[in-house]
Image (tube, rainbow, N blue to C red):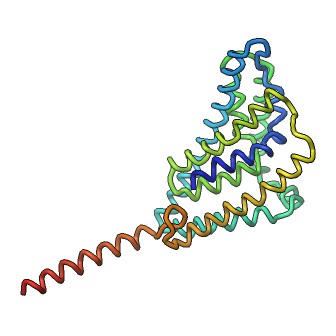
Amino acid sequence: MLATALIFGLLGSFHCVGMCGPIAFLLPVDRNNNIKKIGQIFLYHFGRILAYSIIGLIFGLVGKSLNLFGFQQQLSILIGILMITVIFIPQKTFNKYNFSRPIYKIISKVKSALRKELKKKSPDTFLTIGFLNGFLPCGLVYIAVFGAIASGNALHGSLYMALFGLGTIPLMTSAIYLGNFLNGQVRQRIRHAIPVFVVIIGCLFIVRGLGLGIPYISPKPMTETVDANYNCHTAVSENKTTNKH
């Protein structure tokens, strides 16, 4: 399932260019020194991935706590349903019920800090800009967070979000170098493709939660495997005892 994070980040980066593109365009990179410019862009991306990893770590812990109560399969199915549901909810509904409103003050401070950092050119500026950028509200990040929760593990949740961030690097880097290089028609096609992919990922999470015994995609629950092995060994032991008698 970790591979879906990388692919999701790659496809989602087309959306990211539209949402976070202005920040990428405004990065105070050194246009006259390519080596220095590459280092600055690297720090920017490292800051974003670090922020995503922290988010994944937090929500991975949430998933782990739910797994402790034996809800791993149900959680995977629920996450898959939520992913698909979010895609079919009209944008107007999201605008009406602004889910980021409770943390609006924090987001406002993040944006204010970003504006200040964009005016600087010190080495740590690019790391800070990337880090703050990672905490800005984004629908695709929210969907990726679902994947981090479903991972059911803090480390896997962090890795899931980090891979999502890695997937956004190629296009975001192109945006820094080339600016607004995608025409309207291309963007429209990509926007239509993203929901389809999210639905596919949602279906994969549902299939995973069903425990159909498909390797890597829908493995059987560990409890069933342990019980089967236990019963097998018990049966063998009983047969040996019977044969001795």
Residue 204 or 43: which is nearer the viewer?
Answer: 204
Q: Residue furthest top?
A: 32
Rendered location of residue 58, percent (x, y): 57, 48
Q: Image height check: is 47 above or below 240?
A: above
Instruction: Tell me the quarter of the image containing the N terminus.
Output: bottom right
Q: Position of residue 210 (x, y in %)?
A: 55, 72
Q: Quadrant of residue 179?
A: top right
> Which residue: 67% across, 17% down?
123
Residue at the spot x=73%, y=35% of the render?
133
Q: Is residue 100 above or below residue 35?
A: below
The one of 171 and 119 positioned closer to us in this rendering: 171
Nearer to me, 245 or 133? 245
Give percent across and percent down for residue 206: 62, 68
Instruction: Tell me if 57 is positioned left or right of 227 in this view.
Output: right
The quadrant where residue 75 appears? bottom right
Lateral position of residue 108 relative to residue 135, left or right = right
Q: Residue at x 17, y 83 (%)?
A: 239
Q: Which quarter of the rendering shows the C terminus?
A: bottom left
Q: Is residue 186 above or below residue 150?
A: above
Q: Residue at x 75, y 37 (%)?
A: 171
Residue found at the very far right of the displayed protein: 184
Examine the image and state in which quarter residue 104 appears.
top right
Rendered location of residue 96, percent (x, y): 87, 58
Up-down relation of residue 116 to residue 193 (above or below)? above
Task: Locate residue 73 relative to residue 125 in the image: left or right.
Answer: left
